[in-house]
């Protein structure tokens, strides 16, 4: 089950970075600060204002990915045992 959870979390992490998530102010919402968000005060305020929303999306995707990964590994293990 642990391997399925790892794979599901990795896929959810990759999907999170591929999603075009934007906040109310039009700034891209992400949990990872860019160099622009650190150096520019206006960009930093946009990053901070979108942080709760992007964190919620990130952890929701991670929980979904872990659950789907565990379930798929259990199903594949059951199918493998039945085929032998």
Image (cartoon, helix red, strand yellow):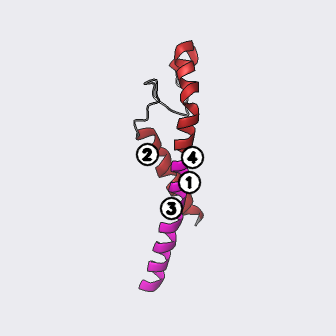
Label of residue 63 in the image? 1
- Can residue 81 be found in the magenta stretch? yes
- Mark 3 to mark 2 CA distance (whole Å): 14 Å
- Mark 4 to mark 1 CA distance (whole Å): 6 Å
Q: Which residues are magenta?
A: 59-84
Q: Position of residue 84 (x, y in %)?
A: 44, 86
Q: Position of residue 11 (x, y in %)?
A: 46, 51
Q: Which residue is mark 4?
A: 59
Which residue appears at 53% of the width and 22% of the height? 46
Q: Secondary structure at mark 3?
A: helix
Which residue appears at 46% of the width and 42% of the height? 16
In the rendered structure, are the residues bearing label 4 and label 1 in contact, judged by CB atoms less than 8 Å apart? yes
- Which of the marked residues, 4 or 3, is nearer the chain's N terminus? 4
Q: Which residue is mark 2?
A: 15
In the image, is residue 4 above or below residue 45?
Answer: below
State which mark lies toward you, 3 or 1: 1
Confirm whether residue 15 shows in the render: yes
Using the rendered view, name the quadrant where residue 27 is placed: top left
Q: Which residue is mark 3?
A: 69
Q: Secondary structure at mark 2?
A: helix
**Mark 2 Cα-neighbour bin, 10 Å: few <14, some 14–19, many ≥20:** some
State which mark lies toward you, 2 or 4: 4
Q: Magenta: predominant secondary structure element?
A: helix
- Which of the marked residues, 3 or 2, is nearer the chain's N terminus? 2
């Amino acid at each position: 089950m642990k391997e399925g959870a790892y794979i599901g979390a990795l896929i959810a992490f990759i999907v999170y970075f591929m999603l075009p998530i934007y906040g109310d102010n039009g700034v891209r919402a992400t949990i990872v600060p860019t160099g622009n968000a650190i150096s520019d005060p206006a960009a930093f305020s946009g990053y901070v204002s979108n942080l709760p929303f992007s964190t919620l999306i990130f952890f929701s995707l991670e929980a979904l990915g872990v659950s789907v990964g565990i379930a798929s590994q259990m199903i594949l293990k059951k199918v493998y045992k039945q085929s032998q």
